[in-house]
Image (tube, rainbow, N blue to C red):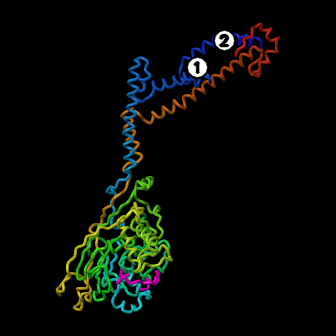
Amino acid sequence: MNFYTEDRLLQLKPKFTPEKQKSTVLQKHKSSDCSSEEMDDEHLCTKEAAKKSVKYYLQNSTLHGLKYIAEEKITLPERIFFGFSFIGVVILSGFFISKIYVKWSASPIIISTSARQTLASDVPFPAVTICNLNQASKSKVQGIPNSFYRQNLNYSLLMSLCGQNQLGESFNVRGTWSNFKTILKAVAQPCDEMLLYCSFGAKQENCSVIFNSALTDDGLCCTFNALDPIFMQRNFSDEDRISPKFSNHFVPMDWTPESGYNRDLPKNYYPRVSGGTGSRLGLTVVLNSSASEYYCTKSKSIGFKILVHNPAELPRVTNYGFLVTAGREARIPIEPIYEDAVPAIRSIRKEKRRCLFSDEGDLTYYRTYSRRNCEIECEAKILIDKCDCVLYYLPRINGSARICGPNDNPCTNEVQTQIESSDEKVTCANCWPACFELSYKVRVTSTTISYEQFLTADEWPPELFGSATNFTEISIVNFYYLSNILRSTTKSEMFGFTEFLSNTGGLLGLFMGFSIFSVIEIVYYVTVRPYCASRTMQLSRRRRLRNMKWMRAIRSKVRPERYDGSSRFWAKDGKQKKFFNIEIIEIT
């Protein structure tokens, strides 16, 4: 035991003299490595240590030009030159990056031709709404008494339908939707009288089955292939139907431009898709104008007003329909135009992309958002607010709102003029286009129907064009596709975050040699390196304390594992000190 402690003491004593320790500390202060033991806590955050860290970063940074600023072998003017050059490069790159950011934020959307092929069978055949220019049959109107018309509700509503207010007459009776529905069905020409013949996809169809009565701004009309009201309106009830639903083998299905059809479709459904191209596989109708029954109309012609539109939209026939006069055969080729959007543009603000997805359009009456449906709802709300009534064909947002009568014509005409002229006081500017839209472009060509009896290749029913047929009241209209492939456009990001990042990185790399690793270097010198230095000093301090503990244990003539590190353990044991006859060196 004694030999062991004495030999061990002789081996360790030279290494822990105060002079040797001081020299070692001074020598280690010259190093700037993170793993060195040159600093203690009070020297870690000094100005001198910060200057050394900045200098070390400049000498080892991957950014171009910074190493010349910390280079000691060049003169001070040269360092200043490189410093100002670096600042100028930073300003110049920031200028170009700001230009890219302005372009990114100002025009984030680009509309381009879709690379994906869209077939005509993927979208429904357009809805076709046909209105007789005559809004009320003369023979049916004669049954309505016009005496004391100021107190007669039916006559007042009839004048509202015809848009008349003769001689400034005053109508004191106010009507509701149920009253107007009754008079409308009583005086309008029904679809089974207007439609004499129908065929679709080279197959003759029952006109009463494929056409439904629809209320438009041109009165009661007949619509083919429109979305069923249960899928078009939010709070639908059978009272909203103009005529009872006709029982047939066609099943109504939901469809939207964004979601399309359901996956599982029955054999016979509507809205129907195209059967093919050409007039033979399109929709063909023969119409009867009944010119002798004309009572009131919005034009000076005899014939029909037709609109080809999206199946999920309410038709606005008065302003956007085209005319087909009686006694003529018309061909109407149709070109579908489909607009879609990539999901990535959802992250762009609505004010920037200027279009709405179906779940973003908050409509009260309609389930499917489109710009046209939004404008119709907006017009109804403005009329209720300005005129305290709603026109008969607009959505009944407020169930208790009355139907506008002839007395309200000045107010309703003024409001509609302001809306259509984009007046800032009365506007529907918040009705943005939908991100997914389906529209149809049409062209009309027509020729006069011949009265001569000669052989034709058309397979018309014999009774349709007989000797008793008045050809001056008949119109033949063909609707068809020209191609099975439709034109499709896509809204996508013109400048996404990836493009912005790549352009910014290209500029920074060109001017300064900047990269993602440059950011990692800055993070390292600000966080990791100071932490590493502090951690290393703590470990060094612990090693010194363990060495001191070992030295004290040897001088106390005990083994280190039995010594508890207390200075009182050996200071009070004078016999052990005299036994070794050694001068105790205090190490602090």
CA separation, marks 1 and 2?
Answer: 17 Å
Observer-nearest residue: 229 or 182? 182
Q: Is residue 206 visible?
A: no
Q: Characterize the local packing of mark 1: few (<14), some (14-19) or many (20 or more) Cα atoms within 10 angstroms.
A: many
Q: Which residues are magenta?
A: 161-183
Observer-nearest residue: 307 or 398? 398
Left or right: residue 182 compared with residue 565: left
Residue at the far top: name it: 581
Q: Residue at x 40, y 23 (%)?
A: 80
**Rendering coords of residue 286 (x, y %):** 28, 82
Mark 2 secondary-structure assignment: helix
User: Which numbered disc covers residue 76?
Assistant: none
What amino acid is found at the position of numbered circle 1 in the picture? Glu
Q: Residue at x 36, y 77 (%)?
A: 223
What amino acid is found at the position of numbered circle 2 in the picture? Pro
User: Which numbered disc covers residue 18?
Assistant: 2
Q: Is residue 121 above or below residue 579?
A: below
Left or right: residue 349 compared with residue 128: right
**Rendering coords of residue 280 (x, y %):** 26, 75
Q: In the picture, residue 213 is in which quadrant? A: bottom left
Q: Which residue is mark 1?
A: 38
**Rendering coords of residue 224 (x, y %):** 36, 77
Mark 1 secondary-structure assignment: loop
Q: In the picture, residue 23 is in which quadrant? A: top right
Whichever of callouts 1 and 2 sits on the residue coming sooner in the sequence is 2
**Rendering coords of residue 19 (x, y %):** 64, 10
Q: In the picture, residue 301 is in which quadrant? A: bottom left
In the picture, the quarter occupied by the N terminus is: top right
Q: Residue at x 39, y 41 (%)?
A: 98
Q: Is residue 404 above or below residue 150?
A: above
